[in-house]
Image (cartoon, rainbow, N blue to C red):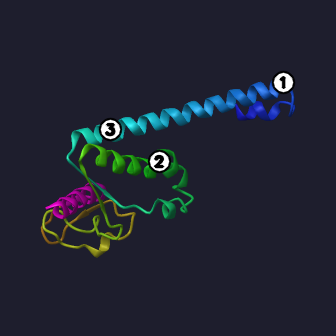
Amino acid sequence: MQRQLANKTKGSRNYQKKRKQTALCYEKITNTRKDYLHKISSEIINENQVIVSENLQIKNMVKNHNLAKSISDVSWYELTRQLEYKSKWNGRNYIKIDTFYASSRLCFSCGYKNANVKDLKVRDWICPFCNTKHDRDINAAKNILAEGLRQVV
């Protein structure tokens, strides 16, 4: 639609029609994304008593040009904002874990802190202490949940 708009003569009646059509299309996309975020956040809040997430610095993450579009498209900030206010409405606990908590490097099984996992390219690792194989993201999620539950109690 943007290309079609660019080919129209600026100020013409067809230009104005195409501009309105383009604006409506973008508005529909925006409303669809907002609706999806509301449904997901409501589902998370209704199914759980305690919600734990990492306190991500999204403003700094968007500075990485390789990830900026992906991060902006999924609206992480808006999701965390909705989780925060909906948890207050429904009497749920919403906990944000510190950004610098070493969730990816800690072995969930034994608590060993692996310094070799600092590099983001390392997706899987084996704990040298207990020989447990870990996926970086799943291990981090387990550690973040455990830390959040520890803070609640």
Instruction: Name the element at disc 3.
Output: helix
Q: Which residues are magenta?
A: 133-153
Asked whether 128 or 94 is in front, the reply is 94
Query: Between marks 1 and 3, how big is the CA–CA gap?
Result: 43 Å
Name the image quarter holding residue 152. Answer: bottom left
**Residue at image coords 29%, 37%:** 43
Q: Which residue has dot 3 on it?
A: 42
In the rendered image, residue 73, in percent from the top left (x then y), is placed at 51, 45
Magenta region includes residue 124: no
In the rendered image, residue 19, in percent from the top left (x then y), is placed at 74, 31
Amino acid residing under circle 2: Ser
**Residue at image coords 46%, 45%:** 74
Magenta region includes residue 141: yes
Query: Between marks 1 and 2, how big is the CA–CA gap?
Result: 35 Å
Placement of the N terminus among the 4 image quadrants: top right
Residue 60 vertical placement versus 113 (above, below)? above
- Sequence-wise, the earlier of marks 1 and 3 is 1
Instruction: Name the element at disc 2.
Output: loop
Amino acid residing under circle 3: Ser
In the rendered image, residue 92, in percent from the top left (x then y), is placed at 23, 48
- Seen in the image, is 19 located left or right of residue 58? right
For label 2, count other residues whose C-alpha is less than 10 Å away and answer few (under 14), some (14-19) or many (20+).
some
Q: Which residue has dot 2 on it?
A: 75
Asked whether 130 or 24 is in front, the reply is 24
